[in-house]
Image (cartoon, rainbow, N blue to C red):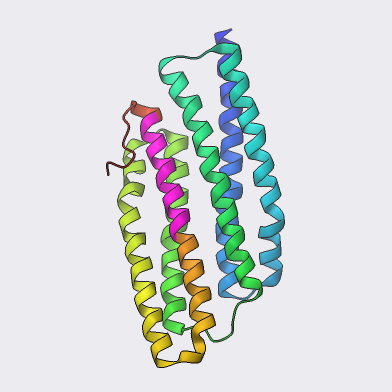
Amino acid sequence: MIKHFHRELEQLTRNVLVMGGLAENAVARAIRAFLHTDAVAAATVVDGDAEINAMELRIEEEVLKLLSLYAPTARDLRYVVGMFKITNDLERVGDLATNIAERAVNRPPDLDPAGVMMLDGMADRVREMVQTSLDAFVQGDRAAAEVVLRADDEIDEFLKRAYECQKAFVRDQGEAFPGALCLLSVAKNLERIADHATNIAEDVIYMVSGDVVKHHH
């Protein structure tokens, strides 16, 4: 019984990692599509969201099966529940990447160059947070997860600066309002992706140690 449980747990972990890779790639492609007005890349992200959604449903079924068949306890239970929560966050990351990709298709041409540079830097940090949170999951690395928690404040600051930058841009060039609104929408989606990466990091800490750090950091 224990042998079967751990075999299925390993398969569940692999599926979560596959889903994580899909979500991580979706974020990277969506940002690239927006920055370069690449409609083909944007369509790839939008079309790929269905696969991420399907993975979430499949993993949820596997989690429920493990819980009902084996009734795990202690650390095994934390691990299974943690993966269940992580898949929910990964599904939301995929949705938010899709939002960004959709903005790329109708992106106004008059974006603020300084705002675009700021968005590019913000996107790099967000992608890094997603990657680090998934690495922390793979390795059961609490220290890596805590790096993600600390980075969340930096993303919040990026968003605040983006709002201030676009307010100044619109004040100087009022006709550029649609572009500013589009850029801020993407920045907000990136900030929400960072929140989900933070959630994953919090779940990793819970899975590894049993400590609940949600809302505490």
208 within the magenta span = no
Residue that appears at 38% across and 67% down:
159
Residue that appears at 34% across and 77% down:
164
Spot occupied by residue 42 in the image (x, y as percentages of width and height):
66, 65
**Residue nearest the observer in this picture, 79 or 195:** 195
- Left or right, 58 with reference to 72: right
Spot occupied by residue 34 in the image (x, y as percentages of width and height):
58, 71
Spot occupied by residue 23 in the image (x, y as percentages of width and height):
58, 50
**Looking at the picture, does residue 170 appear above or below residue 17?**
below
**Looking at the picture, does residue 47 appear above or below residue 38?**
above
Spot occupied by residue 28 in the image (x, y as percentages of width and height):
55, 60
For residue 216, which quarter of the picture?
top left
For the stretch drawn in magenta, what is the main secondary structure? Answer: helix
The magenta segment is: 191-206
Residue that appears at 45% across and 71% down:
119
Q: Residue furthest left?
A: 216
**Looking at the picture, does residue 109 appear above or below residue 21?**
below
**Residue nearest the observer in this picture, 68 or 35:** 68
Q: Count the marks.
A: 0
Q: Quadrant of the C terminus?
A: top left
Q: Quadrant of the N terminus?
A: top right
Residue that appears at 41% across and 16% down:
74
203 within the magenta span = yes
Q: Residue furthest top?
A: 1
